[in-house]
Every structure is written in structure tokens, then in C-alpha cells.
Image (cartoon, rainbow, N blue to C red):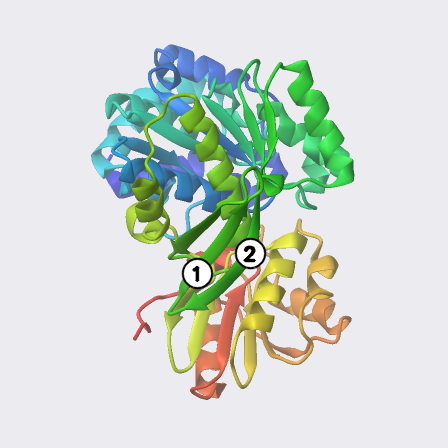
């Protein structure tokens, strides 16, 4: 098989959560353990940092990767889902896994696929571990897919566990209370391995404290270690002044990620780096500054309040759950524009009403859907939205919706594309200028 045929095989032969939802999930780690065992347990050949959380885990993973790269570490990065190219999931020093490896690995594991009937995610996790081992990385930053306790990535024993936050998402899988969701995410905490938690709620802090105590793991709450003194966005960059609560020192940082929700992710990332340095990792202040100011360039991160066009401004953001949309709405309050145009598509298993009630009524809406079976049809999304005072037209594909918005918008307007990773991933970028 060539690369295109290999991808077609992986997509068609393996159950994929992004396409069919919970039917693709396996309820234990058996398949991943058995497959990796057959491969010689490649996940044991390099150090890892494990990152989970409801929102922000992708940004934190990319920030850590960029900083470690800047510090001279050969760094693997595993994230999901991808926006445009399958190979985005597996990177070494920012470079996507090469096509030949994807082909050769898939050929090698075909007998295992036949034996174990794994999911798409289980195979891609094994592929990442094998690639990182072959590339002899110094460290790999591993983002969980869903939850933590039963996530396929949870067969690693990391140097550090990181949990960004807990919010309402995937309740039909993770549980119908914040405590239950926290318990699933806390499943990545390992015996004697320090854990950083970005932010806590009264309901979740006790869950993390109990899990860390049970595992003899040092627990750090990042939001109590540093506070944001001030910030400003200039030319798509975020300039931040932080106060260290331990010694009242001020630290200034410059990020190439302009979303204000990155303030929380920055604080979490810095707490993680504190712990790594305590363990003896060589990470200089210069590496931290270089990494943070070049996250997109070094790691290929996209879709986080990402401006792809001016006049009118077009911004992409992968926020898709209640907390993610709340962050987007806060960002809109800080943005300058004459008229707001929102292109939105969502998947069926989200709590759509909770997202819709957060969105501003004073905007033109363009309801659409991603080209995946999980997507909610655009007319149904429009019907839900109208109950919350959000009105507009619906379109069968995001780029048709975007063309409609561009034809209507004036040069000082803002067009936002959001609601689903898959919708953002399908946006054609050839309108950039």
C-alpha cells in the first residue's frame, strides 16, 4: 500500500471516535498493552510527560514541547485529533511523522489488527510510541485522547503528570458530575510521580488530593503558584506579567498564542517546568522564552484564536464545549470589530444548549457541519440555536458558510469559525492575505 491507501485502510478498518463516537471506545487498556508488548514495549524507551484535562491540554502539550525543543531536547509530541493531516498527531521536534513510517508500521501491525480488533486511537498511540522509540527522542509529551484512566496513552510511567482543569464535556462517557470526571482524569496519576493540576474547583480538588495521596504523588496546584498581574495583546501576540506567589518576583513572557485563555495554560506550563527542573532537567529561562514565543512555528499548533485573514478578520478556534465557548466569548469581549459573524458547527454528543446560551445574540450566524457522521446536521443546529435567540442561515459545508460570510462582511468585521475541531480543520486557508 502507498500512503494514501494506508490511511484509507486505517480509517475504514478501525473504529474511529471522531467519526462514530462512543462505539469506537474500548473500555480497558488491554489492547494497547498487548499491541505494545508485541512491539517490544517501545513506550519504555524514552521519558514522557503525560497531559490530560477538559480544556487546554493541547495548548499545554504544545507549549511544553516547544520549550523542551528550545532547551535542546529531542522532543516527541503526540496529540489528537488532527486538524488537516493525520501526521499532525505524531511529531518529533515539530516535524510530522514521515509517510513511509506510517506505511511500514501499518503493514507490520496488520496481523495484530486482525488478532485484537483495536480502535483507530489504540493503533495511533502504538504508532507514536514506536516512532518516538525509533527516533530515539529524549522525551515525548503525550496528550490523552479522552479522560485518562482508560485512555490508551495511560500505559506510560511518566516523569510528570499534568491535568489542566476539569469541566463539563463527554459526560456520557466520563460521568455526570465534576467529581466523576475528575476521577477519570486523575487516573493518569502514577505511584510516586509528581502531578501538576492547573486549576481546581471545590468539587475537584478533593478528588485530586485523594488520588495523589493514594499514589504518594506530590501535588501542585499551578494557579496558586503564579498570578497574572497584567497582559496585553499586540499584533497577534500575548504579553504577560506574572507574579510568583512564593517570592513575589515578577516574570514577563511573550507568547505567539493570542487567546487570553492561554494565561491559564501558561501558568500550568510554568508549574510543570518548575517540577522538571527540580528533577534535574536543564531548562533555561532563555529556552522558556524562546519556546513560548515560537509555539506555532516549533510545534505546528493551529486553531487557537488563530487569525487567518485580515479585512475582514477571520479567526479560527477549536473551542467546542461549555468552558471552551465561555473562553471564546471572553475573547470576543476584548476584540475590536464592527459586526460579528459566527460560523458554527457541532457534533451530536455535545450539550449544545449549554454552548448556545453563552453565545452573543447580536451576531450573524452561519450554521454548518463537518463532513463526519458525528456532526449534527446544520438545520438541526439552527433549530436549537433559535431557542436561544441566535438566528441565521444554514450551510452544508463550512467553506460554503465562510464564502457567504465573506460576501456579507465589511472590512472591519470579525468572522469567527468555531464549535468543532472538525469544522475548523476543514476550513480552506487559501484566502489568507
Q: Nearer the viewer, residue 18 or 97?
A: 97
Q: Quadrant location of the C terminus? A: bottom left
Mark 1 is surrounded, within 10 Å at the Cα level, by few (under 14), some (14 to 19) or many (20 or more) other residues, namely many
Horizontal side of 292 relative to 232 (left or right) equals: left
- Please name the residue shown 43% across and 27% down the image: 276
Q: How far across and down, in percent of the image, does residue 309 sit?
A: 37, 73
Determine the secondary structure under disc 2. strand
The x, y position of residue 146, in whole percent, is 57, 36
Q: Quadrant of residue 172?
A: top right
The N terminus, quarter of image = top left
Residue situated in front as seen by the camera: 212 or 371: 212
- The picture places residue 329, in percent across and down from the top left corner, at 62, 66
Q: Is residue 177 left or right of residue 189?
A: right
Q: Give the residue pinned by disc 2.
A: 229
Report the residue marked by disc 1. Answer: 238
Question: From this viewpoint, is residue 30 visible?
Answer: yes
The residue shown at (37%, 77%) is: 310
Q: Which mark is residue 38?
A: none
Query: Does label 1 or label 2 sit earlier along the sequence?
Result: 2
- Please report the residue visible at 31 percent of the width from the left and 41 percent of the height from the top: 287
Amino acid at each position: 500500500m502507498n500512503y494514501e491507501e494506508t490511511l484509507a485502510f486505517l480509517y475504514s478498518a478501525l473504529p474511529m471516535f471522531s467519526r462514530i463516537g462512543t462505539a469506537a471506545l474500548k473500555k480497558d487498556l488491554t489492547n494497547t498493552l498487548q499491541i505494545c508488548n508485541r512491539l517490544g514495549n517501545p513506550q519504555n524507551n524514552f521519558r514522557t510527560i503525560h497531559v490530560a484535562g477538559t480544556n487546554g491540554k493541547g495548548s499545554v502539550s504544545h507549549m511544553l514541547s516547544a520549550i523542551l525543543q528550545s532547551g535542546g531536547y529531542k522532543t516527541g509530541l503526540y496529540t489528537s485529533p488532527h486538524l488537516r493531516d493525520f501526521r499532525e498527531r505524531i511529531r518529533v521536534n515539530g516535524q510530522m511523522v514521515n509517510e513511509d513510517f506510517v506505511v511500514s508500521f501499518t503493514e507490520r501491525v496488520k496481523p495484530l489488527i486482525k488478532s485484537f480488533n483495536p480502535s483507530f486511537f489504540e493503533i495511533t498511540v502504538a504508532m507514536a510510541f514506536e516512532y518516538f522509540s525509533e527516533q530515539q527522542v529524549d522525551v515525548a509529551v503525550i496528550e490523552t485522547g479522552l479522560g485518562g484512566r482508560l485512555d490508551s496513552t495511560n500505559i506510560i510511567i511518566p516523569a510528570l503528570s499534568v491535568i489542566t482543569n476539569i469541566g463539563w464535556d463527554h459526560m456520557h462517557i466520563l460521568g455526570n458530575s465534576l467529581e466523576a470526571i475528575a476521577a477519570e482524569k486523575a487516573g493518569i496519576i502514577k505511584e510516586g510521580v509528581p502531578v501538576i493540576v492547573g486549576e481546581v474547583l471545590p468539587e475537584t480538588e478533593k478528588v485530586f488530593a485523594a488520588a495523589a495521596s493514594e499514589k504518594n504523588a506530590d501535588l501542585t496546584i499551578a494557579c496558586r503558584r503564579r498570578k497574572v498581574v497584567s497582559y496585553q495583546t499586540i499584533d497577534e501576540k500575548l504579553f504577560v506579567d506574572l507574579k510568583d506567589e512564593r517570592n513575589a518576583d515578577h516574570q514577563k513572557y511573550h507568547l505567539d498564542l493570542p487567546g487570553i485563555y492561554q494565561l491559564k495554560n501558561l501558568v500550568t506550563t510554568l508549574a510543570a517546568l518548575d517540577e522538571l527542573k527540580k528533577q534535574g532537567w536543564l531548562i533555561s529561562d532563555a529556552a522558556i522564552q524562546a519556546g513560548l514565543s515560537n509555539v506555532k512555528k516549533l510545534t505546528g499548533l493551529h486553531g487557537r484564536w488563530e487569525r487567518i485573514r485580515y479585512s475582514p478578520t477571520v479567526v479560527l478556534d477549536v473551542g467546542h464545549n461549555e468552558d471552551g465557548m465561555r473562553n471564546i466569548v471572553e475573547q470576543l469581549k476584548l476584540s475590536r470589530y464592527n459586526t460579528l459573524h459566527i460560523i458554527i458547527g457541532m457534533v451530536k454528543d455535545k450539550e449544545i444548549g449549554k454552548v448556545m446560551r453563552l453565545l452573543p445574540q447580536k451576531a450573524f450566524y452561519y450554521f454548518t457541519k463537518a463532513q463526519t457522521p458525528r456532526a449534527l446536521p446544520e438545520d438541526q443546529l439552527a433549530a436549537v440555536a433559535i431557542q436561544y435567540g441566535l438566528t441565521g442561515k444554514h450551510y452544508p459545508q463550512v467553506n460554503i458558510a465562510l464564502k457567504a460570510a465573506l460576501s456579507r462582511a465589511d472590512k472591519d468585521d470579525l468572522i469567527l469559525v468555531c464549535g468543532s475541531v472538525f469544522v475548523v480543520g476543514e476550513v480552506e486557508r487559501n484566502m489568507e492575505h
